[in-house]
Image: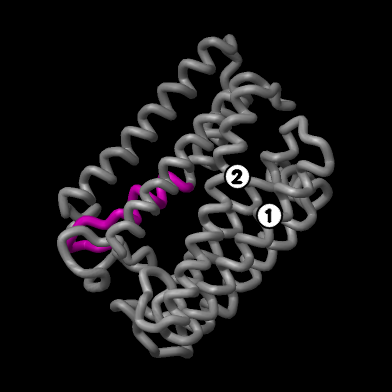
Amino acid sequence: MKYLNKIHSVLKNQSPLLYFVALAHLVCIVPCIIGIFIDERILMGVNVWIKPLKFAISGAIYVASVGFLITFYPYSQRKRSIINNTVAITMILEFFIIIYQGYRGVKSHYNFDSPFDSLMFAAMGILVGINVLIMILFIVDTMRKKLDTSKVMQWSILIGWLVVFFGSWIGGQMISQSAHNVGVADGGAGLPLLNWSTIAGDLRVAHFFGLHGLQIIPLFAFFISKKWKASHTKQLLVVTLFAVLYASWIGFTFYQAKQGIPFIKM
């Protein structure tokens, strides 16, 4: 709990705008849950508020992660503010589009049903593209700068950013085919809440694990560094092994989806 309190304090005091945006995502979880129970509209086989709910949760996690991790970088206040402001604005705008399209009861992704819907999807693509460029900046700076943390943590952060970048590339694969399912049209039977297809391949599985590598790999490295009193070399090797296994898992789920095989068949 003390570590969570520390993250909360650092995020609130050093990245206040990203803290506010993360909080806004979390606040929106409540109306999304209420919407699921009082709004009976179904889109692509699920309630129209399921997607906004998922993006509220994942968006809050990503924004908070950026706001916390950026404090380790030896950036000037001006550069840090530019990055924080850019991530905050782009993420809240993308989330607003997803919320608005959910409210309208239409798709937010791969929607070309009208000029307005096409414009909304294109805008989301631009906003995501800006964040991918920021990911590349973090990758480059993690390699060439000394972060205010241990070598083990810096290494895990670098791998985390690389995995997230790959997860974003998988998102690009979905955009290129204007769908996330492989073998059948989007929609149909899926896992509860996640809605990952249970009858065909679904690229969202690999996309999900890829995007959350930024949290999982550094958290594993943090646990190792705190609980295992071994040399930095041994810790680096263990973290690297874990990262390779995690990346291999993502590669497997991506291959599985491309073959049209469901993550879990039901």
> Which residue is rendered at x = 30% and y = 61% of the image?
180
Front residue of this view, candidates 171 and 9:
171
| Quarter holding residue 242 | top left
Left-right relation of 189 to 166: left
207 magenta-colored: yes
**Residue assigned mark 1:** 86
* Vertical arrangement, residue 99 with respect to residue 21, above or below: below
Q: Tell me which amino acid carries mark 2.
A: Ile
Q: Tell me which amino acid carries mark 1.
A: Thr
Q: Are marks 1 and 2 in contact (CB under 8 Å)?
A: yes
For the record, the magenta segment spans: 197-211
State whether residue 1 appears in this view: no
Quadrant in which the C terminus is drawn? bottom left
> Which residue is rendered at x = 62% and y = 26% of the image?
154
Which residue lies most toward the front here? 115
**Residue assigned mark 2:** 134
Quadrant in which the N terminus is drawn? top right
Q: CA distance from mark 1 to mark 2?
A: 9 Å
